[in-house]
Amino acid sequence: MGTIAMIANALVVPELPDVESNVASVRARFPILAREINGHPLAYLDNAATSQKPLEVIEAVDGFYRSRNANIHRSLHTLGEEATADWEGARAKVARFIGARRNEEVIFTRGTTESINLVASSWGEAFLKEGDVILLTMMEHHSNIVPWQLVAARRGASLVYIQLEADGSIDLEKVEASWNPRTRIVCATHMSNVLGTINDIRRLSEIAHAHGALLLADAAQSAPHMRLDVGALGCDFLAFSGHKLYAPMGIGVLWGREALLEAMPPYMGGGDMIRSVGLETSTYNDLPWKFEAGTPDVGGAVGLSAAIDFIGGLGWDYIGRREASLGRRALSVLGEVRGLSLHGTARDRGAVFSFSFADIHPHDIAQFLDREGLAVRAGHHCAQPLMRLLKVPATTRASLAFWNTEEEVERLGAALEAAKRFYL
Amino acid sequence: MGTIAMIANALVVPELPDVESNVASVRARFPILAREINGHPLAYLDNAATSQKPLEVIEAVDGFYRSRNANIHRSLHTLGEEATADWEGARAKVARFIGARRNEEVIFTRGTTESINLVASSWGEAFLKEGDVILLTMMEHHSNIVPWQLVAARRGASLVYIQLEADGSIDLEKVEASWNPRTRIVCATHMSNVLGTINDIRRLSEIAHAHGALLLADAAQSAPHMRLDVGALGCDFLAFSGHKLYAPMGIGVLWGREALLEAMPPYMGGGDMIRSVGLETSTYNDLPWKFEAGTPDVGGAVGLSAAIDFIGGLGWDYIGRREASLGRRALSVLGEVRGLSLHGTARDRGAVFSFSFADIHPHDIAQFLDREGLAVRAGHHCAQPLMRLLKVPATTRASLAFWNTEEEVERLGAALEAAKRFYL
Amino acid sequence: MSEFDDLYQEVIMDHYRRPKGRADLSHIPDERAMENPTCGDTIKLEILHDEAGRISEVRHNGHGCAISTASASLMSEYTRGLTPEEARAAAERFIGALRGEGKLDELDSMGDLAALRGVAGLPVRVKCATLAWHALLRELGEKAS
Amino acid sequence: MSEFDDLYQEVIMDHYRRPKGRADLSHIPDERAMENPTCGDTIKLEILHDEAGRISEVRHNGHGCAISTASASLMSEYTRGLTPEEARAAAERFIGALRGEGKLDELDSMGDLAALRGVAGLPVRVKCATLAWHALLRELGEKAS
Ligand SMILES: Cc1ncc(COP(=O)(O)O)c(C=O)c1O
Ligand SMILES: Cc1ncc(COP(=O)(O)O)c(C=O)c1O
């Protein structure tokens, strides 16, 4: 794959000067950003792993447990009604957030991983037949690979992978041209957690639909950084995690088309997902509850709802501009570090930067950066097939969010130079 | 089943006078208890549905998100190391809490429901054969029924139910005498969420083991109220939920014997549960991570850890005495309400009281009690097979915890009398 | 007026104590009962029509709380003389209003049904108040197809 | 001393730059490599014995960071001349100490391995420092059985 020179113009959103002046007040909403690490101010550049949480979110969860906590749906006292309203209200908010036609299409899960396992297990067990093909891309996260391997083994289906171009993008014409007529579902990430590549889910969906296949979009990385609209994306399933979206861990979303969800058998069994339980068999509840067995994470949903409000307060415009501007700066700073080669240089990309650097092991780079107060991730990023394609066991990854600063990006460049001096 | 007169001596722990003086200071730890509902102080009598959270727990979660939040296991910066230590530290604390021999035997899940689904799906798919029998009790929660129905249908196994005695207990001799040699696993609740019955898991385990079967104990209701020791219980799997144990929603535990967990195939696929992912197949991580796919709820685990410390601070002695004393008072108060018939009068029981009352529908009772500030649950309590046995569609249930007061119990009695005047 | 008094109004209590349209429906098999997954309550319906095809009576029977019983009774009263299409539209308007999807004020144009207004703020009770109406939609739907 | 300096001590950096026991092990199939699930790092081992059955050398090869490479090198040095049983006990003591199960002070009696002390406070890095030792346990175990 290419090096950094190839993508100087990758981030093309125009910069608005007055956006910058907001940064300090935005940062003030995130208490953790005030931390010192090894004598330096924390520069949190690991947003693709998990995001930090604004006070709005922390306080919403705190407030839930201080004054409204109860189990939902079957406790008809005041607290139970309030908690139920919180839970179903969060669902309605998520539905609006992603442009779902109906609240019933929004299923709460623990996160992207559970969302995809739900589809692979429920839809896959019911609808995949021997010889069917599941089409993935070579840039998928393990969470969008392993569940399909498990169900493919049980159903006698097979996995086929869309190869990548040199810049880490997908060539849609090749996808069309090499279409396998046994393909039943395409599982593609909306944005790569390694390469930063943004895939054209709309076109992929059109191709899939033209051949009678479904499309599942893994929006774990895109949901925090751009407005999603399931209608415009055209996909059939969409999965994302709250914890990457400025909300707490433990809550995530599966959106699916109503008719598909209706046709799917339940996933887990237990309280709340049933209509009536007999000794030998049971009948199941309506959507969305059919897929929500057991006491859910109401506190987490309250946090997710607050996070969506927080995003609404900032606006996608602000977030998009800020991150595009930071991303450009990161590209130019990293471009000046000698010995650094960036993986992923597609034109459409987010502010996620994975690189190899001067034969220093990513662990050692990350540990050195930590000494300087910079938090980055080192490893295979749960994308081993992609690592093998890149011919590296692991990479170092810096991933930005709107609360990062130009100064943090520059500290990254300087610290990488210092790491070279230390290790080589 | 019997009425209240039969159980006047059910709760036999002696009362210590000085325990009572602590109640106000214990209550002060639970901010929600200060709420007013419809002009009355909240009397929260729905602890079996979900518990309230002490400040220690609320603040621990809050503190995690304010200063330590990161993803775990693969982020080797300072925050990542701290969060990983929090997560694995919580696991070690849970292991000690239930007397597990090894930390690796503790799997974090969302709650009891997911824990049981994990066993039913992973163990059941791998080890159940056509014609095998799964033995349940007639007092199981849907979460310990439906997952077994789902796997039984797929594997051609069948479900058999242990019948109940008139007092809502199990006759272990009958269990022995009617043992079906095809029984592979016994799935029994440790404490009924409807009847309050405490089952003798130790003896049930011995019977199961003597016949080469396993025993899964659903400890959702017992874990919050008594010391659990998996060694002493003798079971093979144990499941419980954090949210009933004074911890946040979204976190729960499956404990299993190491050799069993080792032999079981993975449940969900995704990040963290793999050793190596190839294109077609993958190899899986060691215990416990093999069963923990995707970003887990680290904040929830931090809360659970704080809850265990909180319990340790009070001591099981305090909790046991307080709840026994409150339970006795509840029995005598409810015993004086004319027209009330209690379901579940076993000698070994917890402070959970389900009743039918004067032909008033449980919804109407609960709504009336809510007017008086009393929070109880009305419904089938996710135990429809038991409801059919009791020949009622639903019951009203008051469930106590150590923070309840004698005065609250008396308000319940008075409010029930008033409900009768209103509806009849 | 407290939330409780708002819920258990005089009209509701009257319909609860003396439900209109309640009938012995033991000839209808139990499998045809509509179930409230929240609490196990059930309701059976039978729809009688006049020669013109209008609804002459909706009969009901089942286990239910005051709210669900009163709602079934009010439904029986409200639907008398409606065409199946009108009844279906009414059910959708009523359910939508209580679930917060439609406008709550629409209830005001539905006669005594407005007495169920208080339910709208209580998501758990919405299921009680709408059970009979969901059963009505199902029965009308199955007739239609 | 900062956490970082504590981790990347002189001894560690020396073993990282000039690892003892590193050898070409391309004759060992890749499937026999031990994998660190955290990062995809791998290590292959080959244990050579003298006539008395004692370990004459543990050879290693693989991808790894400074900590895992230095740990493999220190292991190669430490195990020279041990019986397989002694080596196994050492591996268990070392892993236990770093994982916080054993006593950390035990490292002090293990010569230069004490330089890996700083890893104990960093659960993510513990996996780096113990990878070679887990591989050793596996190789010794398979030999034994
Ligand atoms: C006995 C019993 N088992 C299982 C459960 C299910 O627990 P959860 O909803 O937390 O998964 C409950 C609680 O509702 C219960 O009382
Ligand atoms: C592209 C992508 N998919 C899926 C996941 C899995 O998300 P989670 O761990 O929240 O389930 C992640 C995050 O790690 C990701 O980046």
Image: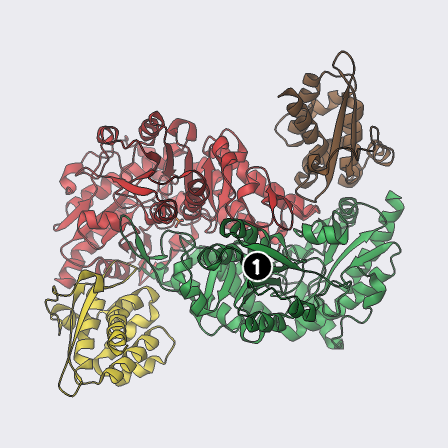
Chain colours: A green, B red, C yellow, D brown
For this view, does A112 lie left or right of residue B254?
right
Q: Position of residue A16 (x, y in %)?
A: 74, 77
Left or right, residue A289 beside residue D6 = left
On screen, D129 above or below A231?
above
The residue labelled by disc 1 is: A134
**Which residue corresponds to the image point at 89% horizontal and 47% vertical from the top-left?**
A421
- The quadrant holding residue C138 is bottom left
Front-most of residues C123 and C24: C24
The number of numbered badges drawn on the structure is 1
Residue in front for this viewpoint, A115 or C71: A115
| SS under mark 1 | strand
Residue nearest the observer in this picture, C97 or A299: C97
Task: Please give the name of the residue rendered at 58% of the width and 37% of the height, measured from the top-left corner.
Answer: B286
Tell me: D56 left or right of A261: right
Percent coordinates x, y for residue B304 in the rendering = 49, 44
Q: Is residue A71 visible?
A: yes
Report the chain holding disc 1: A
Farthest residue to the top: give it: D52
On-image quarter of the N terminus of chain A = bottom right
Q: Amino acid at mark 1?
A: Ile
Q: Is residue B96 above or below residue A77?
A: above
Q: Where ligand 2 lies, by quadrant?
A: bottom right
